[in-house]
């Protein structure tokens, strides 16, 4: 799959910005200690890894994104489905049309009844999905979180796109550089319960406590719920409330593109700095017209590809999800499982006018 990628992919290494480790995870609620122990046992102590086991043929993988119409997650899931075909499996994408905290629960229950071999989920809420995911693990259905984690005892693996801490801190560093380390800034996030968004924001706020940012003021965290129109309206609301705002950080692909669309047709274009996480195809015109100077993101195709191979390795018995185990993710090569079942894809790329035309996703 990746051997035939055009030059745009080969450019990624040259443009990568280092982002390193870990996510902030919360424990599940609403379960008994006994049920938690049973679910955890299915991951940690009930199985032994056989790294020489072949990948099973005919594996059924189901991708459950935050919402079915999210263009970024569509890229992730389609790449994972294509990867499943590489090792003789099948994949499908199912999910809700909204990113509500409990909107994924009914889909998990259906996938359990269908006896999927693995469920791959980008969680809208770390705890709301725990009950049905634990039921899936008790039935020997493997659970892999990707992009946005569940609580750690509700899955075997978490495929993290890049280091949670460095993503948060680097977004603040980039913003500070662009606004001269002074002025009011805001954050335009997705939903209030999104695991990855909240973890990044915690590190952003911590970074802002450092002396280097004493002249910067985070005035508001706004939530666009990963909906284009609401994110557009939240951007408008921020600028009406704070007409002297210097910058907006939007760590969500839906949010940054909606904010860029608003800024590009407003008097704030060129005056308010916008950065965050976006896809090149969404953001290209805003880079070209000067609305945005730079933004960043990992390769979502590789995230889905890695998730599919990790799920297959689990379902085939090559790994159990224990720290230190290794597996091969097709043409991406070997990966090692870290603390709490985390597997990190690698550093993202930074996109600017100089390199954005090298990418097509």
Image (cartoon, helix red, strand yellow):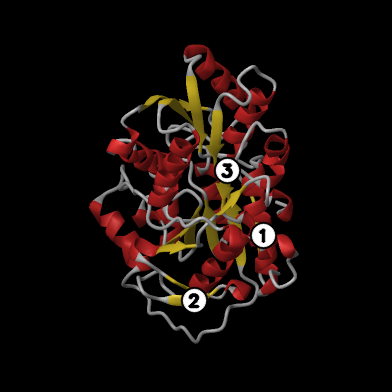
Q: Residue at x 31, y 43 (%)?
A: 29
* Residue 17 visible in the current orientation: yes
List x then y, in percent, for residue 295.
57, 43
Numbered badge on residue 350: none
Q: Residue at x 53, y 43 (%)?
A: 106
Secondary structure, mark 2, is strand
Q: Is residue 213 above or below residue 74?
A: above
Instruction: Confirm or deny contact between disc 2 and disc 1 (CB under 8 A).
Output: no
Classed neighbour count for the residue bearing mark 3: other residues with Cα under 10 Å, few (<14), some (14–19), many (≥20): many
Q: Residue at x 36, y 74 (%)?
A: 324
Secondary structure, mark 1, is helix
List x then y, in percent, for residue 244.
48, 16
Kindly identify which residue carries mark 2: 327
Kindly identify which residue carries mark 1: 79
The earlier-in-sequence mark between 2 and 1 is 1
Alpha-carbon distance for marks 1 and 3? 22 Å
In the displayed image of the protein, which residue is found farthest to the front? 180
Kindly identify which residue carries mark 3: 295
List x then y, in percent, for residue 21.
39, 57
Q: Which residue is more in the foreground, 157 or 218?
A: 218
Secondary structure, mark 3, is strand
The earlier-in-sequence mark between 3 and 2 is 3
In the displayed image of the protein, which residue is found farthest to the left? 33
Q: Which residue is more in the foreground, 156 or 110?
A: 156
Q: Which residue is more in the foreground, 350 or 318?
A: 350
């Amino acid at each position: 799959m990746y051997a035939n990628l055009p030059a745009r992919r080969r450019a990624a290494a040259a443009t990568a910005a280092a982002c390193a480790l870990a996510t902030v995870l919360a424990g599940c609620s609403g379960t008994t200690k006994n049920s938690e122990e049973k679910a955890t046992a299915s991951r940690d102590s009930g199985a032994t890894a056989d790294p020489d086991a072949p990948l099973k043929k005919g594996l059924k993988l189901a991708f459950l994104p935050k919402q079915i119409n999210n263009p970024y997650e569509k890229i992730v899931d389609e790449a994972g489905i294509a990867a499943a075909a590489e090792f003789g499996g099948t994949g499908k994408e199912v999910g809700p049309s909204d990113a509500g905290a409990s909107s994924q629960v009914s889909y998990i229950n259906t996938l359990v009844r269908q006896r999927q071999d693995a469920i791959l989920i980008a969680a809208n809420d770390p705890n709301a999905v725990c009950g049905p995911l634990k039921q899936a693990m008790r039935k020997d259905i493997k659970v892999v979180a990707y992009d946005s984690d569940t609580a750690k005892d509700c899955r075997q693996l978490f495929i993290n796109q890049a280091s949670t801490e460095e993503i948060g801190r680097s977004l603040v560093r980039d913003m500070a550089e662009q606004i001269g380390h002074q002025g009011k800034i805001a954050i335009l996030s997705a939903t209030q319960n999104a695991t990855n968004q909240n973890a990044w924001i915690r590190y952003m706020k911590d970074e802002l406590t450092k002396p280097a940012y004493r002249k910067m003021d985070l005035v508001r965290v706004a939530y666009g719920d990963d909906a284009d129109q609401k994110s557009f309206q939240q951007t408008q609301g921020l600028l009406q409330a704070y007409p002297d705002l210097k910058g907006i950080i939007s760590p969500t692909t839906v949010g940054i593109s909606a904010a860029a669309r608003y800024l590009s047709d407003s008097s704030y274009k060129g005056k308010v700095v916008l950065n965050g996480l976006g896809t090149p195809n969404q953001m290209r015109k805003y880079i070209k017209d000067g609305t945005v100077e730079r933004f960043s993101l990992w390769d979502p195709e590789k995230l889905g590809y890695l998730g599919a191979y990790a799920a297959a390795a689990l379902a085939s018995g090559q790994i159990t999800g224990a720290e230190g185990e290794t597996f091969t993710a097709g043409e991406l090569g070997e990966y090692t499982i870290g603390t709490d079942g985390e597997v990190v894809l690698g550093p993202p790329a930074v996109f600017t006018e100089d390199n954005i035309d090298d990418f097509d996703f």
